[in-house]
Image: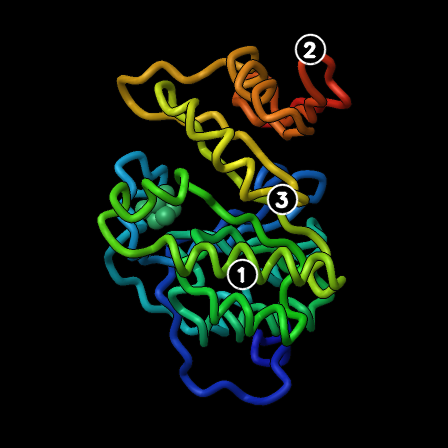
Amino acid sequence: MKPAAAFFNHPVISLKVNFGGFVPLSTVDWRGRAVCTVFLRGCPVRCSYCHNRPLQDGEDLREVEEVAGLIRSSKLLVSGVVFSGGEPTMQPVPLKALAEASRQMGLRVGLQTNGVFPKVLASLIAEKLVDHVALDIKARWERYDNLLKEKYSDPVKESLALCRDARLAGDLPEFEIVVTLFRGYEDEVPYIAKTADGVDLVLQQGMEGGVKPLTGDELRKVADRVGRVVKIRTREEGEVVYAGDRGRRVSGERQG
Ligand code: SF4
C-alpha cells in the first residue's frame, strides 16, 4: 500500500492528532453521500445529552499520516470524508492537514461543528478545504451562554454568519444548521429558525436516556410552526424533507 505520506504536498514530520475513531463507510453523516467519518477527540462544550460523551476528553495521539491512511483505505467506497467529534475545529492544524490530504485523494470534505471556533472555519473555507458544514445550534441566542455555561453565543453567531456568506458567495457548496431537538424544548425552534433564514434547517430527533424522543409526526408539528421547508431526521424515518402545515412531504428517504 502506498504510504499515507504520499498524499501530502510536502512531508509532514510527526504531526499528531488527538484521535477519536473512524467509521469506514457511513450513509448518515452527510446525507446523500457515502462517506467515511473521522472523529477527533476533545470538545470544550459539555452538552448533557452529548451522543459522543467519551470523546469530550481523553488522549489518543496518532500521526496524522496514520489517520490519512485510514481515510485512504475507504477511498474506493466513498466520495467524501466527514470530520466530526468531539469538536474537530478544536485541532485546527491536524484538521487542516487531514482535509488537505483528503482533497489530494479526490474526496469531498464535510465538517460537523458546534461553531465555537469561527476562525478555524473561516480559514478552511478561505482555503477551499471544506464542501459541507453542518453547524449545531443548541438554543435561542438569549439562552445560549446560560445553557452552555460559557460565552459561546458570539462565536457561534460569527460561524453562522461566515458560513451563510460563504454559501451565498459560492465558496461553501453546502451549509446546514442542525437542531437536535428534545421533548420539552420545542419552543426554541421558531427562534432558531429566524436566525437560519436562507439556510437549510435540520430538525434532528434528540435521544437522551429517560426522555421519550419526539416522533416524526411531533417534529413535523414543530416544523409547521416555522413556516418553511425543514429537513426532519429521525431514527425511524431517516431524513424527510418537509414542506409545511398541510402535512406534505416533499421527499423522503429511509436511512439508518
Ligand atoms: S458540542 Fe457536540 S461533541 Fe461537544 S459536548 Fe456538545 S454534543 Fe458533545
Q: Are marks 3 and 1 in contact (CB under 8 Å)?
A: no
Q: Label 2's element?
A: loop
The local secondary structure at tag 1 comes to helix
Q: In the rendered image, which residue does mark 1 sit on?
A: 70
Q: Classify mark 3: residues with Cα within 10 Å, few (<14), some (14-19) or many (20+).
A: many
Q: Which comes before the other along the chain, label 3 or label 1?
A: 3
232 w.r.t. 128: above or below: above
How much space separates mark 3 and mark 1, taking CA atoms? 18 Å
Q: Going 61% across and 24% down the picture, which residue do you hit? A: 238
Q: CA distance from mark 1 to mark 2?
A: 43 Å
The answer to which of 64 and 240 lies nearer the viewer is: 240
Disc marking residue 30: 3
Q: Which mark is residue 193?
A: none
Tell me which label, 2 or 3, sits earlier in the chain: 3
Q: Bin the neighbour count of mark 1 within 10 Å (Cα to Cα): few under 14, some 14-19, many 20 and up.
A: some
Residue 247's mark?
A: 2
Residue under the point 60% across and 37% down: 201
